[in-house]
């Protein structure tokens, strides 16, 4: 049985994405002393928390309608999973082909991010490019054919953006090594980006709003009801009373809501920023968002711009080191690091025909994901805890989901009638399957635990081909 998550570790491994920190946000505290009472507290400042704040505070609301918002971050802004991820946004339209609302939502989320970046002029290396998911077992290829065919039947417009290839000629054209790769799924819509700069761009935009109070290095250690319909948040700098609380805490959610420990389980992933060498430079550079899926394989890759280092941002290899139920992102596993430095020449066709045996790592780091028991994000009001909301549990697939999940929670926070607010969020595109409610909790607990699913390598493609939900990987 899963135990509640620990708090984020005080120290953390050095992520490449933090190599150019925001001068406006490092150590930022809007006020020297914490306010004692606020309308809304958001715990967490990654992409989910940024979205909730943005949709609560930005736009055309009058001063009377805007609620004062306090954001509490245990470390620096965007120092958790969003600031440690793979640097890509790859919607997986065929992951849930029996529920078109999910693929539609991921597509809408992708477009919303693109529009946000353009509207706010956020410099974050956002670049649209195709996505390729290399498949390394015949079973994965067969399941992909079934899932894509189902998607094309149930959601033809998005299905037209996805196709499966499994011939040697086509795989070599994609740059995948054969015979190791058995097939691939190509998605027309994907992007690479600098995720930390995206999120800090949003926070920098919001800093001028007087209704926002942003407090870094302020750990929320516990959450308790006051007895009068409000909530106490306990921190090392004092307590805060809030009318409403949003936990944008992903893997760490169960530290504050222990009853969710079996629903969102921490899982450590590892990343590297590799120096490309001649095999992946110039005309040989990669121009797609890659994922590599197979037995004991769940890896992902994008390459940064040519004139800015062209780093190969490569992550995965979880089977080579400790992962599930690990909350500490300070350590970097040596075996896993070696795997990441040596695997790419075996996965991709080297541009010069030879390839290096081991690539040099400029940065190696870890980050903590939140694995959901049913493989879907948890979005909404916590049952029996009126005024507390969760937006978390992305199972390593947060970038194609989190921005609009945060918007949906903001809709609920602003609503007076919770049932009506939830229906409004669904009308605006939130998949009903994402809602946090008693019925879904019961269904999720009828599935195997996250630990058992992970041990059995129950990849999403397998369960969705059968029309079920289940834990997955990206």
Image (cartoon, rainbow, N blue to C red):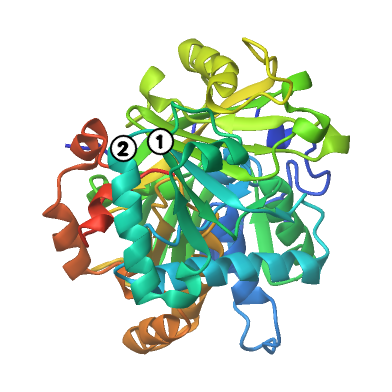
Residue 281 is left or right of residue 220, and the answer is: right
Checking the image for residue 17, the label placed there is: none
What percent of the width, then of the height, locates residue 2?
A: 22, 37
Judging depth in this view, the residue of 326 and 457 nearest the camera is 457
Element type at mark 2 = helix
> Can you say which quadrant of the picture contains the N terminus?
top left
Mark 1–mark 2 CB contact (< 8 Å)? yes
Q: Residue at x 14, y 61 (%)?
A: 442
Element type at mark 1 = loop
Q: Is residue 341 above or below residue 416?
A: above
What percent of the width, then of the height, locates residue 167?
A: 46, 41
Judging depth in this view, the residue of 346 and 16 nearest the camera is 346
Checking the image for residue 182, the label placed there is: 1
Q: Name the residue furthest left.
A: 446
Checking the image for residue 138, the label placed there is: 2
Whichever of callouts 1 and 2 sits on the residue coming sooner in the sequence is 2
What percent of the width, then of the height, locates residue 290?
A: 56, 41
Q: CA distance from mark 1 to mark 2?
A: 6 Å
Q: Is residue 160 above or below residue 35?
A: below
> Can you say which quadrant of the picture contains the C terminus?
top left
Q: Is residue 319 above or below residue 254?
A: above
Residue 265 is left or right of residue 126, and the answer is: left
Q: Is residue 460 above or below residue 178?
A: below
Viewer can see residue 324: yes
Q: Residue at x 65, y 41 (%)?
A: 76
Q: Give the quarter of the image for residue 10.
A: top right
């Amino acid at each position: 049985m899963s135990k509640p998550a620990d708090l984020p570790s005080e120290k953390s491994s050095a992520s490449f994405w933090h190599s150019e920190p925001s001068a406006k946000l490092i150590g930022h505290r809007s006020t020297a002393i914490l306010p004692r009472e606020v309308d809304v507290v958001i715990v967490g400042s990654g992409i989910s928390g940024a979205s909730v704040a943005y949709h609560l505070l930005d736009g055309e609301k009058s001063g009377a309608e805007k609620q004062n918002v306090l954001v509490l971050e245990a470390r620096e802004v965007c120092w958790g999973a969003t600031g440690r991820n793979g640097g890509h946004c790859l919607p997986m339209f065929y992951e849930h082909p029996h529920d078109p609302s999910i693929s539609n939502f991921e597509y809408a989320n992708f477009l919303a991010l693109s529009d946000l970046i353009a509207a706010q002029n956020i410099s974050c290396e956002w670049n649209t490019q195709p996505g390729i998911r290399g498949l390394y077992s015949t079973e994965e290829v067969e399941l992909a054919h079934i899932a894509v065919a189902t998607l094309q039947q149930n959601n033809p417009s998005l299905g037209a953006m996805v196709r499966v290839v499994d011939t040697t000629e086509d795989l070599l054209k994609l740059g995948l090594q054969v015979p190791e790769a058995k097939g691939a799924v190509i998605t027309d819509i994907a992007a690479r980006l600098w995720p930390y700069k995206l999120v800090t761009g949003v926070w920098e935009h919001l800093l001028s709003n007087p209704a926002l109070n942003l407090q870094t290095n302020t750990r929320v250690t516990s959450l308790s009801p006051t007895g009068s319909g409000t909530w106490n948040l306990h921190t090392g700098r004092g307590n805060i009373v809030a009318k409403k609380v949003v936990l944008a805490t992903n893997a760490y959610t169960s530290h504050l809501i222990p009853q969710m420990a079996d629903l969102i389980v921490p899982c450590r992933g590892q990343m590297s920023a590799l120096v490309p060498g001649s095999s992946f430079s110039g005309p040989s550079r990669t121009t797609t968002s890659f994922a590599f899926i197979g037995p004991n394989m769940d890896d992902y890759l994008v390459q940064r711009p040519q004139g800015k280092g062209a780093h190969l941002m490569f992550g995965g290899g979880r089977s080579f080191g400790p992962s599930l139920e690990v909350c500490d992102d300070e350590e970097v596993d040596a075996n896993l690091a070696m795997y990441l430095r040596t695997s790419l020449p075996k996965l991709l066709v080297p541009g010069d025909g030879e390839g290096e045996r081991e690539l040099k790592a400029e940065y190696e780091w870890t980050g903590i994901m939140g694995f959901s028991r049913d493989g879907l994000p948890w979005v909404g009001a916590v049952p029996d805890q009126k005024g507390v909301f969760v937006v978390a549990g992305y199972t390593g697939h947060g970038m194609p989901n989190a921005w609009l999940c945060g918007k949906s929670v903001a809709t609920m926070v602003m609503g007076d009638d919770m049932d009506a607010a939830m229906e409004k969020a669904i009308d605006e595109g939130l998949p009903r399957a994402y809602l946090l409610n008693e019925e879904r909790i019961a269904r999720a607990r009828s599935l195997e635990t996250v630990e058992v699913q992970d041990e059995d390598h129950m990849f999403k493609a397998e369960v969705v081909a059968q029309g079920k939900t289940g834990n997955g990987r990206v």
